[in-house]
Amino acid sequence: MNRREALKQVSWILGGTIIGSGIFLEYGCNPAQEKTAGFFDQKTIDLLNEIGETILPQTSTPGAKEAKVGEFMDIMVKDCYTKADQKIFTDGLAALQQKCKETQTKEFMNCSASERTAFLTTLDNEQKAYMEAKRAEEPSHYFRMLKELTLLGFFTSEVGATKALRYIETPGSYDGNVPYKKGDRAWA
């Protein structure tokens, strides 16, 4: 066998492997799985994005809306929360809207940025008092869940990890003694 024939045979083998694996992954691993609908509708996801943007607004770095935290929360609540926690979360969103109507005389989406911040600050103070007084068997406050999901969704997103935190794609060796100056961003 000469070099040209050997390369031709190797290319057939590699090509078959690549094509075969693609077919296997496309049809073999996901037998008739259809894309299921999310837990929330688009209006609720938009609301979650706006709440997230109020918690982590755009400054010199992107905000939570750019990281699509609403879509992240949709997935996390649907796939990772128990039925009881899902109910707390959805009932909490309804309570958030109701309290906003009572205190701001309009829905959250119609409030200005300063009204949203003031309203969520009040809710944050409420959840802090609740969490300090609650017993271990009692559920978390819905706003705490919402705030935790916002932070998790933002800082684990590409936008949050690369633009809000310091990020090196391939860092090399570990250095446990990196100088830190006050005000430096955390590492992703």
Image: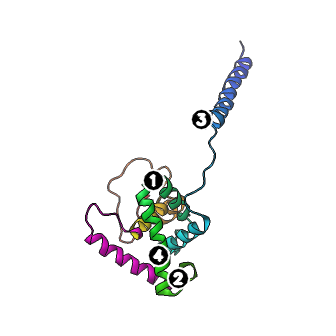
Q: 10 Å neighbourhood of mark 4: few (<14), some, or many (≥20)?
A: some
Calculate the distance from the C-alpha at mark 1 to the C-alpha at mark 2.
31 Å
* Residue ID at (31%, 73%): 130
- Three-letter amino acid code of the residue under disc 2: Ala
* Residue ID at (49%, 60%): 161
From the image, state whether disc 2 or disc 3 is nearer to you: 3
Q: Is residue 104 left or right of residue 24?
A: left
Report the residue marked by disc 3.
Answer: 29
Specify which label sits upstream in the sequence, 4 or 2: 4
Q: Is residue 185 left or right of residue 135?
A: right
Q: Is residue 123 left or right of residue 132?
A: right
Q: Are marks 4 and 2 in contact (CB under 8 Å)?
A: no
Say which of 92 and 186 sits in front: 92
Numbered badge on residue 158: none
Calculate the distance from the C-alpha at mark 4 to the C-alpha at mark 2.
16 Å
Q: Are marks 4 and 3 in contact (CB under 8 Å)?
A: no
Q: 10 Å neighbourhood of mark 2: few (<14), some, or many (≥20)?
A: some
Is label 4 in a helix, a strand or a loop?
helix
Q: Are marks 2 and 3 in contact (CB under 8 Å)?
A: no
Up the image or down, 130 lies above or below 29; here it is: below
| Residue 23 percent location from the top left of the image | 67, 33
Specify which label sits upstream in the sequence, 1 or 4: 1
From the image, state whether disc 3 or disc 1 is nearer to you: 1
Specify which label sits upstream in the sequence, 1 or 2: 1
* Region rendered in magenta: 114-142
| Residue 46 percent location from the top left of the image | 58, 69
